[in-house]
């Protein structure tokens, strides 16, 4: 009994260290600023104009609007009197994500074996997970994926209804919660159906809940949220000079999807961006140690499918890669929690996975557009530096400023 308690205490300490290291990886750019190192970047500068501006609309000022959760958290941090709310936002979203991930690691550790140590190390060391989110400072992806992680926690206990509810809640942060979460829930619901744990009638009920929930949220946002013009005015009131791009992407609707697709396939860097992400994601199919071909197929389904779907409509390939990797990580954990036999992986597979991870490390982290720095440098050397997204609006949508309200456009022009 005493040895068991000591073992559990040691495991708890290791889990705490992994969680702390993951948060530190996501917030590592804050450390020089926090300790007052000369020349350290201000957290608000790390956030950047676009990422800062899309966080201005919120539930307090604009009602129940689309993607309002991140802005509301930022508004609460501002109201709390933090000197640097951007730093608080990055730290808070990292913690919100780490909590469900640690619960999953703990559940896997209780199953016995040591694979949880490998998956914990991946969270800290992978250039496409917390290290990558630390580079893409202030983005809301960690907040979005935290809801998918809670859905995975529900799936670990075969609580499919709770998993769907978590995904619906995640759409308040970003629609990618559905793009990546639905394949995850569908894959494990299908496995449960094959084993008799989920009937077709129950599966139909889950689908109805999902579609009905999405419809209710869309209706509520139209009835209870500000108009698109008012949301754009909120952004431009805070940043009349650089806020136009964020306002356009926030309120442009389907028009921005066409613009994003145009930008995506209209730049010469797109093949390098996509290829770098696809190759990296393929490597993770081995790094995540699938126990069988069926498990490998599941990992590929929950990662490549949403990555491909998002890449058609938006140019942020590096972001979609990082979301795909964490979704595959969640799936690999769930496979082992639900069926301990999945953990029986030959040592040579573990050795190959370790070598592949070591191969990725010197290529450095993923960024908004590329799978890693190596791909970005190669593309820049061969094709020259890529243009900023805002510079590409004009050829893809010459009248994009017409989306903005005339009053806000006038403010922006006077500021210039």
Image: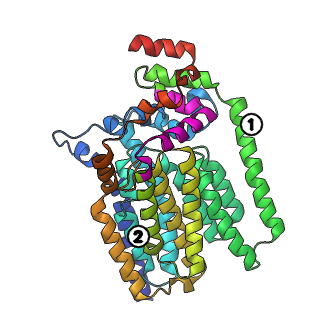
Is 384 or 96 nearer to us in this picture? 384
Q: Is residue 65 visible?
A: no
* Left or right position of 203 against 327: right
Closest to the observer: 86 or 372? 372
* Label drawn at residue 242: none
Q: CA distance from mark 1 to mark 2?
A: 40 Å
Left or right relative to 34: residue 212: right
Q: Which residue is mark 1?
A: 219
Picture quarter with the N terminus? bottom left
Category of crowding for the residue at label 2, using alpha-carbon neighbours closer than 10 angstroms: few (below 14), some (14–19), many (at least 20): many
Q: Position of residue 323 (x, y in %)?
A: 50, 56
Name the residue carrying label 2.
Answer: 120
Nearer to me, 126 or 226: 126
- Which corner quadrant of the image does residue 399 belong to? top right
Q: Residue 297: percent from the left, percent from the top?
A: 59, 73
Q: Which residues are magenta?
A: 245-271
| Disc 1 element | helix
- Residue 96 lies, with reference to residue 337, above or below; the image says above
Q: Main secondary structure of the magenta part?
A: helix
Residue at x 53% of width, y 38% of height = 262
- Residue at horizontal 47 percent and vertical 77 percent from the top: 289
Q: Residues within 10 Å of mark 1 (few under 14, many from 20)?
A: few
Q: Nearer the viewer, residue 127 or 389?
A: 389
Q: Are discs 1 and 2 less than 8 Å apart at CB? A: no
């Amino acid at each position: 009994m005493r040895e068991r308690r000591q073992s559990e205490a040691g495991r708890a300490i290791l889990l705490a260290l992994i969680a702390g290291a993951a948060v530190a990886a996501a917030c590592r750019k804050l450390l020089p600023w926090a300790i007052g190192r000369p020349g350290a970047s201000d957290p608000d500068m790390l956030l950047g104009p676009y990422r800062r501006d899309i966080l201005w609309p919120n539930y307090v000022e604009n009602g129940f609007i689309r993607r309002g959760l991140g802005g509301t958290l930022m508004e609460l941090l501002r109201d709390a009197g933090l000197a640097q709310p951007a730093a608080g936002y990055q730290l808070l979203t990292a913690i919100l994500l780490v909590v469900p991930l640690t619960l999953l690691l703990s559940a896997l550790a209780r199953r016995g074996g040591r694979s949880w140590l490998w998956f914990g190390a991946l969270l800290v060391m992978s250039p496409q997970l917390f290290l990558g989110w630390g580079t893409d400072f202030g983005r809301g992806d960690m907040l979005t994926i935290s809801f998918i992680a809670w859905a995975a926690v529900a799936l670990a206990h075969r609580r499919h209804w709770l998993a769907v509810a978590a995904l619906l809640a995640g759409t308040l942060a970003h629609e990618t919660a559905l793009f990546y979460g639905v394949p995850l829930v569908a894959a494990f619901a299908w496995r449960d159906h094959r084993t008799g744990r989920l009937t077709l009638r129950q599966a139909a009920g889950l689908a109805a809940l999902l579609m009905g929930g999405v419809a209710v949220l869309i209706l509520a946002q139209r009835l209870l949220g500000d108009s698109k013009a008012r949301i754009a005015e909120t952004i431009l009131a805070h940043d009349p000079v650089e806020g136009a791009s964020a306002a356009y992407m926030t309120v442009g609707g389907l028009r921005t999807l066409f613009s994003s697709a145009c930008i995506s396939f209209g730049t010469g860097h797109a093949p390098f961006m996509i290829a770098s992400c696809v190759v990296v994601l393929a490597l993770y199919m081995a790094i995540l140690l699938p126990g069988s071909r069926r498990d490998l197929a599941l990992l590929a389904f929950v990662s490549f499918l949403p990555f491909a779907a998002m890449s058609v409509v938006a140019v942020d390939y590096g972001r979609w890669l990082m979301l795909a990797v964490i979704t595959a990580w969640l799936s690999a954990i769930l496979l082992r929690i639900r069926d301990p036999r999945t953990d029986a992986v030959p040592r040579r597979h573990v050795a190959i996975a370790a070598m592949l991870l070591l191969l990725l490390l010197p290529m450095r982290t993923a960024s908004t557009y590329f799978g890693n720095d190596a791909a970005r440098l190669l593309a820049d050397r061969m094709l020259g530096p890529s243009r900023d997204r805002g510079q590409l609006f004009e050829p893809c949508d010459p009248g994009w400023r017409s989306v903005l309200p005339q009053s806000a456009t006038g403010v922006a022009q006077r500021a210039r």
